[in-house]
Amino acid sequence: MDYGRVLSRAWQITWRWKVLWILGFLVALGSGAGGGGPTMSSSSNGNMTVGPWDLGQIGEPGGAFWAAFSGVILALLCLGLFIALAIWVLSIIARGGLIAGVVQVEDEGTTSFGQAWRVGVQRFWTLLGVGFLAAIPMFILVFTLLIFFVLGVVAAGGFSQFSEAATGVSIVSLLLCSGVFCCGLIIVAIVLDQIRIYAERAAILEGLGWIDAFKRGWEVIKDHLGPTVILWLIFFALGFVIFGLVIGVMVVVGLPAGLLAASLEPSGWLAAPLCCGGLLAFIFFALLGAVVETFTSATWTLAYRELTGFVPQPVVETVSEA
């Protein structure tokens, strides 16, 4: 495989068809989450406080505000869960849309957000099934590791009544076995994720069901292990480069701004530049994530086509004409 040609063509598609960045942004958004909440404390007389507000004791008239506040927090948590679920669903559709968009560009010379998105929607359940199959062994391994850890702790407690040496041997054995399990878990996770990457392309390009697509992904990685490893290492190196560039930008921009803010007296006007800086940082990282996801998906799609000798078939073309 001509790695230079695949990578350069993937970058050409990424830069030329910026509409795909929207799908890339959704994929990147589905890969992260965050949250926070107010700081709560309890005074010596049992009253609950949130920041500067005294909420009174729970169950008393003064605690009415706390009851209402708890309801608001619960509602916000439910809303956050709903939003996270929606983002996760959209990210699955967007992954399929990115694959379809690259195929449409290669086979038809053009694409659009609507054309690519429709393919992702059509193949949503297949992509969900592929992800589920890739996650089953991971769940089993994690569950097994947890059981092994609990049994090890119980065994250590049992041995401790006989001798400290037995306890030490048990703990060391537990740590060694846990380390082996963790290393195995990482290897299995990498392999399964790569199978998923190929299986998703088999589902979109070849119109396979989720089980057949997963089998096809395993066949591709088994028959083309060398090129797959090389591409994976290339992306691993690119990830380090991008990480270094991001850290450099944060240091160059954020450090002087932080030092300047620290040297000034706290005042309300500092909120404006902080908000602007936070907004600019969000836009920067959103664009970076969108471009990286689009380029990565395009590269694996082009690599899949070249490795498998894929010939265009009617599934994507029919959807694009609708």
Image (spheres, rainbow, N blue to C red):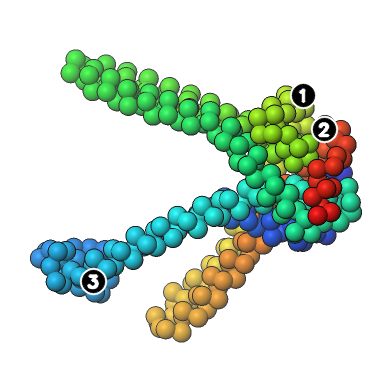
Estimate how packed mark 3 is, as few (under 14), some (14 to 19) or many (20 or more) residues with alpha carbons within 10 Å.
Answer: some
Residue denoted by label 2: 307
**Secondary element at image label 3:** helix
Between residue 94 and residue 259, name the one nearer to us. 94
**Is 31 in front, or is 76?**
76
Instruction: Give x and y (percent) for residue 24.
Output: 68, 55
Residue 3 can be seen, yes or no: no
Residue type at tag 3: Phe
**Secondary structure found at label 1:** helix
Q: Residue at x 38, y 23 (%)?
A: 148
x and y, in percent, of residue 147 in the image: 37, 25
Compute the Cα span from label 2 to label 3: 63 Å
Using the numbered discs, state the Cα–Cα distance from disc 2 to disc 1 in whole angstroms.
9 Å
Question: Which of pointers 2 and 3 indicates the residue nearer the eye?
Answer: 3
The residue that disc 3 covers is: 65
Return the disc, 2 or 3, that comes first in the chain's sequence: 3
Q: Residue at x 73, y 25 (%)?
A: 219
| Mark linked to residue 223 | 1
